[in-house]
Image (cartoon, rainbow, N blue to C red):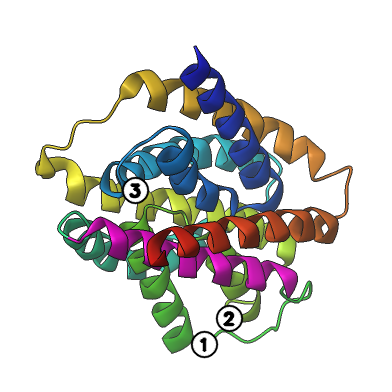
Amino acid sequence: MTVLILALLAGAVIGLALGALGGGGSVLAVPALIYLLHFTPAEATTGGLVIVTLTSVTALTAHARDGNVAWRTGLLFAAAGIVPAMIAGAVSGHLPATVLTGAFAVIAALAALRMLRPARTEPSGTVHPGKAGAAGAGLGTVTGFLGVGGGFLAVPALVSVLGLTMRRAVGTSLLVITINSLAALAARAGTGMQLDWAVIAPFTAAAILGAWDGKRLSHRLKGTTLQRIFAHVLLAVAAFMLVDVLV
């Protein structure tokens, strides 16, 4: 029962963040699975992809209903990340647990720092195809390797590189996250890894419900306030994971 409650609570928090911020919440899924629910790093990154994919689809539906998804732009951005996501997803399962945990801690810290420096809220008006492709490929690699959606990278890239407004960038990032996560899951499908669905299922269900609440919450609170609170939590998690690896 304790495991179930932990899974529900963690899923709700991650869903709230993903729905409100368009990314970042999934970064907490992997450490929650490792430290609260005792998954191995390899199991946690794969389970994180399942949670991220289903939750992102739910949040994407809500944003698409409001017209905040740039479908063509998002598909082109995601296309650059599909192959890197599949390659990274296949490689990830063969790496030592300490390498995965340490890499994840670094990415989590970078995500927190990125949130403390919010992207511009106005579009740049200039699209740079080379930068867009590089950003899409980098996002796909992070998604496949570490089992995170990478919205903390996608949102600022969609604003500064592809010229979307912040609101449309948040919605479009969910489309990119969904596609990259599916590609990474496809690469891991043949590894034979068994997931504890008694934990993953309620975790995902709570995250999906939280994503809907997060979407409503984003209209009531300032986005910068939400980002700063979440960023400080994420920094603490990253520090804990680094200490765990190094000590």
Q: Earlier in the sequence, mark 2 or mark 1?
A: 1
Q: Nearer the viewer, mark 2 or mark 3?
A: 3
Comes first in the chain, label 2 or label 3: 3
Q: Nearer the viewer, residue 58 or 27?
A: 27
Relative to 120, residue 78 above or below: above
- Residue at label 1? 128
Q: Is residue 108 magenta?
A: yes
Task: Please say if the residues under marks 1 and 3 sit with CB atoms less than 8 Å apart.
Answer: no
Disc 3 crowd, CA 10 A, few/some/many (<14, 14-19, 20+): many
| Residues in magenta, as a range | 95-117
Q: Residues within 10 Å of mark 2 (few under 14, many from 20)?
A: many
Given contact means CB atoms under 8 Å apart, are the residues at marks 2 and 1 in contact? yes
Q: Quadrant of residue 13?
A: top right
- Residue at horizontal 49%, vertical 51%? 175
Q: How packed is label 1: few (under 14 Cα within 10 Å), some, or many (20 or more)?
A: few
Report the magenta stretch's main SS: helix
Residue at the (19%, 47%) spot, across then down: 188
In the image, taking residue 182 as reference, residue 30 lies left or right, namely: right
Q: Residue at x 59, y 48 (%)?
A: 25
Report, in whole angstroms, how far the alpha carbon at label 1 lies from the one at label 3: 32 Å
Asked if the magenta segment contains residue 104, the reply would be yes
| Nearer to me, 141 or 219 | 141
- Amino acid, disc 1: His
Percent position of residue 34, x then y? 40, 42
Q: Is residue 59 left or right of residue 37?
A: right
Badge 3 amino acid: Thr
* Mark-to-mark CA distance, 2 and 1: 6 Å
Residue that label 3 marks: 45
| Residue type of the residue flagged with mark 2 | Val
